[in-house]
Image: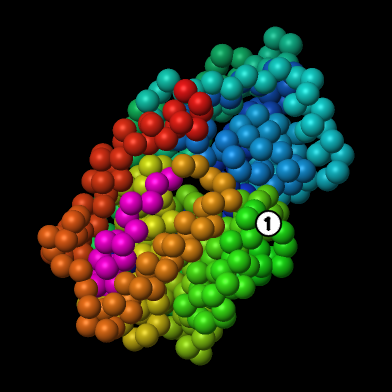
Amino acid sequence: MKKTDKRYRAYLDILKEELLPAMGCTEPIAIAYAAAKARETLGTIPHRVVIEASENIIKNVKSVVVPNTGNLKGIAASAVAGIVAGNADKGLEVISSVDDQERKEMKRFLESEEILVSKSKSGLIFDLMVTVSSGKSEASVRISHFHTNIVEIKKDGKIIFQNQPCDEVESSNLTNRSFMNVADIVDFTKSVEISEIRELIQRQIDYNTRIAQEGLKGKWGANIGAIILETWGDDIKVRAKAMAAAASDARMGGCELPVIIVSGSGNQGITASVPVIEYAAELKVDEDTLFRALVLSNLVTIHQKTGIGRLSAYCGAVSAGVGAGAGIAWLHGGGFKEVAHTMVNALAIVSGIICDGAKPSCAAKIASAVEAGILGFYMYKNGKQFYGGDGIVTKGVENTIANIGRLGRDGMRETDKEIIRIMLGE
């Protein structure tokens, strides 16, 4: 793919839009970000807070620890963290700097101030609004479609910022991804100048490796990564999934280390990168090959998620595990044929995993998704594959990806609602 090709620039832009740093699970952090911006707009610490969130956001915030809060969980805690200690200029690292006094103030605020949480009535899958007030003054911030997309800011009933109509399904702020396909992604991976993605990919390597190592050392979540290594040994096929699980252990357990996200998700960013990094070290490939494998894995993950949507009942770790499998195929010298068959094989194995919110068990789901990606590659390497007509698999990788998008976006819509009802005890 030539640099003059408009697709070349689009793929670069997509990587820059997606590979962002975030501390903690991105849904609670989005709430903290909105709350910090609302407090900034209000100009003082409020005495009343109202959080309206779509059901999918509620699902993803309910059970995960908010980092830097002293193990607090939930929507109210996320908003209070942003109000008390947030710096909205830092985006998804909004609560990366918190001291002990601020943690004490968070607990006091939760115990003594009025905080109301309700479901958004907008009908959007990703939608939240935080309204803060003190005396007669009030400010609100609304985020829709993705985690940092502020669509409206109000102060005392007056709109002081408006980005786009809130009922638009897709944001005009992101590069259109409808042109993406696996053949193009492989072509771009081959031709991209490393200097144009070096800083971006190196940051992903540094951040996500660091939190994976912390996940093995510390007592985070259910310690899935450590259990995998202790039970099955230190073979690379085991280590690749164990390290990814360990990073999620730490992240879901409230670790304060940042990660580089993909498709709005830290767990997907971890899953798409850590197994590829581990395999690259085992195979002793050069830096160029590793960087290109990560470009491929990230873009394959994003491509799958484009048809599914940011939030769904379809576990996003599956898409990233498939991406990791594609990256591992590349590390072994694979091209389009090897990547495509790896993806289809992996999708046939694990596309039934549900998303029931962010929590410690995400680490185990990540391990399963990575294992499927690895198995998908070794199946093809050994002359085995799943064929069109085998369940949801159909001939052609793009057709299978389209089926997965249909399944996650449309077919699992009622499943998503039922999961939320179960989680909320309705």
Q: Amino acid at mark 1?
A: Trp
Residue at image position (33%, 76%) is 377
Q: Quadrant of the N terminus?
A: bottom left
Rendering quarter of residue 12: bottom left
Could you tell me if residue 58 is visible in this image? yes
Q: Which residue is mark 1?
A: 220
Q: Provide the secondary structure element on which disc 1 rests.
A: loop
Left or right: 58 in relation to 251: left
Q: Nearer the viewer, residue 228 or 250?
A: 228
Residue at image position (43%, 45%) is 355
Please rate how many residues cluster around mark 1, counting C-alpha atoms within 10 Å: few if below 14, some from 14 to 19, many from 20.
Answer: many
View extreme (front): residue: 231
Residue at image position (66%, 38%) is 73
Rendering quarter of residue 183: bottom left
Q: Nearer the viewer, residue 286 or 15?
A: 286
Image location of residue 222, percent across then percent down: 63, 55
Left or right: 273 in relation to 67: left
Span shown in magenta? 339-355
- Residue 374 lies, with reference to residue 310, above or below; the image says below
Q: Nearer the viewer, residue 238 or 183?
A: 238
Tell me if residue 347 is in the magenta stretch: yes
